[in-house]
Image (cartoon, helix red, strand yellow):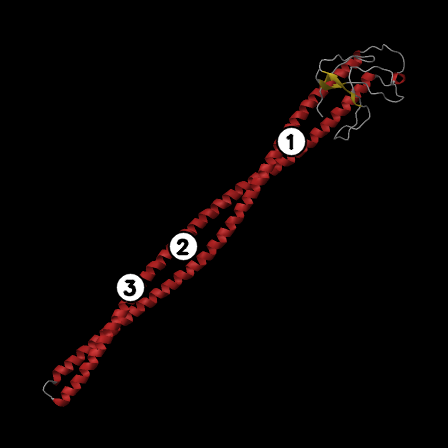
Amino acid sequence: MRKTLLGVLVAALAAGAGMPPGAAATADRQAELQALRETIARIQSRLQTLEQRHKHTARALAKSERDINRRLHRTRELEAARRKQVAELQQLERERGVHLKRLRAQRRSLRGALSSAYALRQQGTLRILLSLSEPAAVGRSLKYHEYVQRAHGARIAAVQSTVAALDAVADQIQAKRDALDLTLLTERAELDQLRKAREERRRVLAALDQEINSKQKRLARLKEDEAALADIVKELDRALGAQRPRDRRPFASLKGKMPLPAKGPVTAHFGRRRLHSQLKWQGIVIAAPIGSDVTAIATGRVVFADWLRG
């Protein structure tokens, strides 16, 4: 037959006190009930602390989420601005390339015009020395080449001015892009820190959830035990009031002479420390088969025989 530990309400034998067994049992259960209620109070206090921490951590996590969203929005704006500046720089580089190409062409043309004018001037001087038949034509040719040279020079100066202006604008955009790169670097570093803080808060919140859930379950079990134990104490009080003395001998004189209330080995003895607890046993525990009879061993009656969770 399967065995089980059966918690039996057995009277504590108070040395020399002559305390009735029912009164001793009631006192034992009241002490257990008080200890249980103190444990419940401690758990409730701990739960309040945990719930406050959970509340503050949840608020901090929500703030982290908002801060991250703002940083992400700001980072996207900065990245868009940087892309725009890169595009502007690329466009300026293309325009600068076109103008530099024109400048090279103008310089080539000017070199050609200068060469032609120099040759014409040499030929004209020689013609004038050899023959004075066409001096006006030579003069007109020289004037034309001078005009062409001035025109090329003006175009070259204009192109050089345009290239210089493009370089100045490019330098400004590059300076802005460098500053933007630094800002982006800072924003991304702060965003990484915010994400790390968010993950840490999520971890703490998960741990708090787990502990709160565990404490709530334990509290529910203890409250069930409290209710059951309170009912036992009430029943003991009623039984104590209704009992009639059957044995006039002093109760202390019966120590070691009374039979056990149930058949089975004793697994917990009066006065010994309970396992994993600072409390001591105020009675005995008998391992008896399920369904065994439990009888009163002195004046009174059995009011409870069942499991009690520790």
Q: Residues within 10 Å of mark 1 (few under 14, many from 20)?
A: some
The amino acid sitting under disc 3 is Val
Q: Residues within 10 Å of mark 2 (few under 14, many from 20)?
A: some
Question: Looking at the picture, does residue 37 appear above or below residue 207?
Answer: above
Q: Quadrant of the C terminus?
A: top right
Q: Earlier in the sequence, mark 1 or mark 3?
A: 3
Q: Residues within 10 Å of mark 3 (few under 14, many from 20)?
A: few
Residue 230 rendering spot, x and y as whole percentages: 72, 20
The amino acid sitting under disc 2 is Arg
Residue 23 rendering spot, x and y as whole percentages: 81, 18
Per the model, the C-alpha gap separating discs 1 and 3 is 77 Å
Residue on which the image places disc 1: 215
Q: Are marks 3 and 2 in contact (CB under 8 Å)?
A: no
Question: Looking at the picture, does residue 231 appear above or below residue 91?
Answer: above
Residue 184 rendering spot, x and y as whole percentages: 46, 54
Per the model, the C-alpha gap separating discs 3 and 2 is 24 Å
